[in-house]
């Protein structure tokens, strides 16, 4: 489980680039290594470690026939064979008149953090940290969750001279505390394990679990809500899925189609994609080797900009923003580091300002109901509370929401100054604050 | 070196280092994915993967490690790492894992394949998909048309410290078309044979040919365009008939996941959740009406959950889960079955070589009853036929659900009428299944593939199936709005 390093990653890429009989060729290498310790019922029940290196080769023949092949055989021979297979695939594909060619070399910003200690975390260290959390749980409370540590190495090289490599580390902790009739949840992701507040997260989940015991029934309907960062992250991630990319926009399947320049959310709402921020799991360039840019997508409530990969930028006469996915991608540009700007109030202040409403810790199993209306449905989970006169008066049984995201973001009446980085179990991360929303539609309820 | 020898190196390292039990899976996978949009090939990727996963029990604790580096040193190191991980888990152990016994098998198995899809020339595949999009584009008003093809082959060689040695190859094929119409801030989709890249089966190219992608193109394109002008399904409580595609996902979410014994035991609590079902409710819990019988069947022909042996070496089998509406069984692994003092019913699978095997649905089937869909519609005075899944959501105990489908067709006096767009329905699991008063017969029973079932941490994807025939439900709430 040793870091391969930029030189060896690019050396392997060169083996793929040496393929003959092509007009252009690109090699994308993705190496992941790490361990995940999973616990449930106060015991470690599943623990894994995986090391993998994927080589993806895009080959172009006859000027505009493009084929992609991939392998997990990390030898130079494997890379060469995969390049030859990509070339074969390219020969079988009809010409693509809109193929824009590959990007050329560029200067890359400084982004992405690598922490040696996080990459080298031993299984026993993860077990010890989890045991510490479990041992501090109140009587009658058990916990389930994961602690994961790992590294990601990425290299991109192409026949036009692109040569880029970077490495990042990531530590994530999630915990669901179960106090019988109530559950609570907390999670965080950081570039370094040492910065992950494991004990505090465990304490927070346990407090929520105890406080949500014996939940009461609540009639579904529209309520003012405080959405904590994990719930907000779900909404912001779905906005990313529903179309910040130029391809989706121009195909007419983005919720922003025809709305650029329009007010789509409350003026207090600003959403950007920022893979260069030091407090995220960042990257200096995308999977095509294009430098990452910080793009403001919703600026003070106005739909402001789109994300462009190399192809969509060429098609629409724009600069690529560094949001290309690994080829082949029918999705187009995609945000991996969405960020919602913080506000000026404390999260506690937002709840204190609520006359009667709900505080929601997180959502569960959310899915799209109507993409153009940004309408989604899902359940609340692991800490749904009734707030009266600014105080939590107890837990409520979980509710199903069916709600337009832009509708909710248009009804924002407060944004916390504190933000959290959310991204447990996901390649993407979202940094977001707690929101106070004037009205949120709960369409049905469950029994717990 | 042969795959079994590579696996043997890791197995020896693990047992030599103190594993009381160990199994090793060598997996090589091959895939091909093609997406055509209008007249252009958008995606075409040929993928291959190869690696080894080592699972060990040391003093009753699990450890798992995996690598794609298949030299002698790496395999030995991976075996030892699995043991190190298991030893670390002992820091937090309140019970020892025991395994239900299984007779170690030495055997082979392969999916019956009519025509090997990997042997078909790429030109022919692309030509078929282009013809399918062209057929859709003959209908005016379409924003774009897609056609896709997905092929998977997975060879796994399983060896265990108990003496099992199993070599099996699973081949799965999927294809579909999608018509998208947009206008006035609306977007409507119609797909065939199923949504989310189509229908998937265990088998070869013959599955694609049976789908009639080209001849169905104009129809689904017309329906997508017509949906733009269709009214929204009004909110009310009514009679609902679910077609096979939607009913398959209803079984998946509200029956299959709920009966996974690891979920019931809380082992998935931190992520996907648990279940409203308790282990002691077998033979007691009324899950649905007397017409509801569900089997867990990894022998179903053409299923995506069909195999010779699961990833613990347990032979494929068919077991009852719900009989005449009453809970009869679970989906189990060797670890969870042992807690109940039973044998595993062989539902443990892993995503590739790099993941720990978990309980996964195989083919969880709603058994057919009688009659044809046409007869069921004719027998329905007032209601809607809901066709093809669009979205799904269910709570973390599998009780409250809400689904959306691509189309609702009005049923009035036994006849299909106008279409409604953006239909949704919601309910609670046992109440909903209790309201089922008709299930169509074997002639309408079909095995539908679900290629994207997520579970576990790190996240794993499984390809599973559900055999179903259309069924009718009474007093269902439809038409939820944001």
Image (cartoon, rainbow, N blue to C red):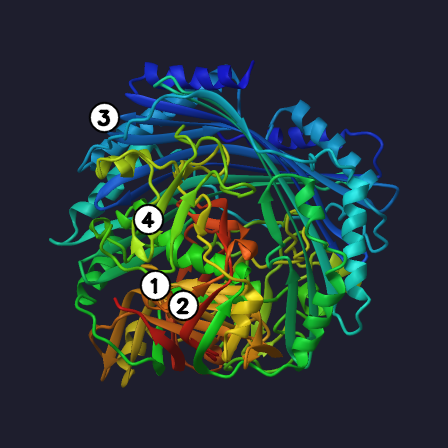
Q: CA distance from mark 3 to mark 4?
A: 22 Å
Q: What residue did someone put label 3 on? A: B59
- Label annotation for residue B437: 2
Residue in the foreground of this view, choosing between A300 and B342: B342
Residue B293: quadrant of the picture = bottom left
Q: Residue at x 69, y 41 (%)?
A: B205
- Assess whether mark 1 and mark 2 are in contact (beta carbons under 8 angstroms): yes
- Assess whether mark 1 and mark 4 are in contact (beta carbons under 8 angstroms): no
Q: Residue at x 63, y 56 (%)?
A: A323
Give the answer, above or below, for where A309 lies relative to B265.
below
Closer to the camera: disc 1 or disc 3?
1
Question: Which element carries disc 3, helix, strand or loop?
Answer: loop
Give the answer, above or below, for where B316 lies relative to B22.
below
Q: Are marks 4 and 2 on the same chain?
A: yes
Q: Residue furthest left?
A: A139
Q: Are marks 1 and 3 on the same chain?
A: yes
* Residue B200 shown left or right of residue B166 in the figure: right
Q: Residue furthest right?
A: A62
Q: What residue did someone put label 1 on? A: B289
Q: CA distance from mark 4 to mark 2?
A: 33 Å
Residue B39: quadrant of the picture = bottom right
Q: What residue did someone put label 4 on? A: B268
Closer to the camera: disc 4 or disc 2?
2
- Residue B129 x %, y %: 76, 51
Question: Which element carries disc 4, helix, strand or loop?
Answer: loop
Closer to the N terminus: mark 1 or mark 3? 3
Residue in the foreground of this view, choosing between A445 and B174: B174
* Residue A102 shown left or right of residue B336 in the figure: right
Residue in the foreground of this view, choosing between B124 and A291: B124
- Residue A143 x %, y %: 23, 50
């Amino acid at each position: 489980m040793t870091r391969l390093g930029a030189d060896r990653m690019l050396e392997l890429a060169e083996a793929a680039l040496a393929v003959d009989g092509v007009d252009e060729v690109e090699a994308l290498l993705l190496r992941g290594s790490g361990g995940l310790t999973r616990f449930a019922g106060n015991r470690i029940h599943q623990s894994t470690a995986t090391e993998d290196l994927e080589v993806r080769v895009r080959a172009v023949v006859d000027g505009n026939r493009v084929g992609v092949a991939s392998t997990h055989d990390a030898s130079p021979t494997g890379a060469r064979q995969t390049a030859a297979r990509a070339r074969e695939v390219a020969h079988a594909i009809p010409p693509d008149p809109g193929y824009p060619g590959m990007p050329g070399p560029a200067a890359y910003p400084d982004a992405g953090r690598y922490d040696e200690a996080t990459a080298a975390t031993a299984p026993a260290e993860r077990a010890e940290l989890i045991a510490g959390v479990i041992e501090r749980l109140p009587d009658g409370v058990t916990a389930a969750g994961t602690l994961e540590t790992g590294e990601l190495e990425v290299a991109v090289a192409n026949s036009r001279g692109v040569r880029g490599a970077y490495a990042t580390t990531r530590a994530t902790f999630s915990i669901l505390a179960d106090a019988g009739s109530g559950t609570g949840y907390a999670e965080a992701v950081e570039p370094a394990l040492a910065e992950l507040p494991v004990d505090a997260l465990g304490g927070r989940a346990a407090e929520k679990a105890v406080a949500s015991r014996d939940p009461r029934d609540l009639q579904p309907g529209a309520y003012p809500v405080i959405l904590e960062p994990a719930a907000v992250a779900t909404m912001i991630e779905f906005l990313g899925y529903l179309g910040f990319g130029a391809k989706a926009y121009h195909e007419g399947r983005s919720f922003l189609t025809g709305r650029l320049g329009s007010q789509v959310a409350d003026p207090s709402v600003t959403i950007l994609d920022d893979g260069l921020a030091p407090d995220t799991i960042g990257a200096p360039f995308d999977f095509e080797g294009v430098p990452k840019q910080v793009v403001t997508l919703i600026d003070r409530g106005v739909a402001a900009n789109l994300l462009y990969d190399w192809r969509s930028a060429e098609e629409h006469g724009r600069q690529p923003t560094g949001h290309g996915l690994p080829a082949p991608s029918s999705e187009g540009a995609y945000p991996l580091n969405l960020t919602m700007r913080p506000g000026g109030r404390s999260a506690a202040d937002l709840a204190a300002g609520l006359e009667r409403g709900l505080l929601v810790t997180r959502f569960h199993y959310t899915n799209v109901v109507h993409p153009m209306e940004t309408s989604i449905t899902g359940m609340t989970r692991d800490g749904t509370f009734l707030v009266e006169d600014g105080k939590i008066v107890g837990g409520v049984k979980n509710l199903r929401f069916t709600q337009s995201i832009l509708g909710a973001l248009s009804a924002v009446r407060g944004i916390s100054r504190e933000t959290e980085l959310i991204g447990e179990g996901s390649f993407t991360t979202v940094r977001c604050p707690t929101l106070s929303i004037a009205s949120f539609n709960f369409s049905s309820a469950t029994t717990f | 070196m042969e795959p079994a020898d590579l696996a043997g190196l890791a197995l020896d390292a693990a047992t030599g280092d103190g594993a009381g039990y160990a199994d090793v899976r060598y997996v090589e996978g091959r895939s091909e994915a093609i997406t055509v949009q209008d007249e252009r090939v958008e995606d075409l990727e040929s993928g291959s993967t190869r690696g080894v996963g080592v699972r060990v029990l040391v003093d009753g604790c699990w450890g798992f490690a995996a690598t794609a580096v298949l030299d002698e040193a790496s395999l030995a190191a991976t075996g030892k790492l699995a043991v190190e991980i298991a030893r670390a888990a002992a820091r937090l152990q309140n019970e020892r894992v025991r395994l239900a016994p299984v007779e170690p098998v030495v055997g082979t198995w392969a999916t019956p394949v009519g025509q090997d899809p990997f042997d078909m020339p790429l030109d022919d595949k692309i030509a078929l998909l282009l013809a399918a999009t062209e057929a859709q584009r003959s209908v005016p008003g379409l924003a774009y048309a897609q056609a896709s093809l997905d092929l998977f082959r997975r060879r796994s060689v399983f060896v265990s410290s108990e003496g099992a040695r199993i070599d099996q190859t699973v081949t799965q094929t999927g294809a579909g078309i999608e018509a998208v119409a947009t206008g006035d801030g609306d977007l409507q989709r119609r797909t065939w044979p199923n949504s989310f890249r189509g229908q998937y089966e265990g088998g070869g190219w013959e599955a694609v040919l049976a789908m009639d992608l080209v001849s169905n193109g104009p129809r689904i394109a017309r329906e997508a365009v017509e949906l733009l002008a269709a009214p929204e399904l009004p909110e009310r409580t009514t009679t609902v008939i679910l077609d096979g595609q939607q009913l398959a996902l209803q079984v998946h979410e509200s029956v299959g996941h709920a009966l996974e014994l690891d979920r019931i035991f809380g082992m998935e609590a931190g992520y996907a959740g648990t279940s409203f079902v308790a282990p002691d409710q077998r033979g007691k819990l009324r899950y649905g009406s007397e017409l509801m019988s569900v089997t867990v069947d990894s022998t179903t022909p053409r299923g995506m959950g069909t195999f010779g042996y699961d990833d613990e070496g347990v032979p494929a089998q068919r077991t009852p889960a719900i009989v005449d509406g009453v809970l009869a069984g679970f989906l189990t692994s060797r670890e969870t079955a042992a807690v109940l003092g039973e044998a595993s019913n062989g539902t443990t699978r892993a995503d590739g070589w790099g993941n720990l095997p978990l309980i996964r649905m195989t083919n969880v089937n709603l058994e057919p009853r009688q009659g044809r869909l046409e007869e069921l519609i004719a027998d329905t005075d007032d209601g809607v036929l809901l066709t093809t899944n669009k979205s799904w959501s269910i709570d973390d105990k599998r009780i409250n659900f809400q689904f959306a489908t691509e189309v609702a067709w009005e049923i009035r006096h036994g006849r299909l009428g106008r279409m409604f767009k953006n239909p949704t329905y919601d309910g609670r699991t046992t109440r909903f299944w209790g309201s089922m008063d008709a299930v169509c017969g074997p002639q309408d029973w079909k095995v539908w593939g679900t290629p994207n079932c997520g579970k576990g941490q790190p996240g794993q994807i499984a390809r599973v199936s559900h055999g179903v025939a259309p069924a009718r439900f009474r007093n269902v709430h439809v038409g939820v709005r944001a």
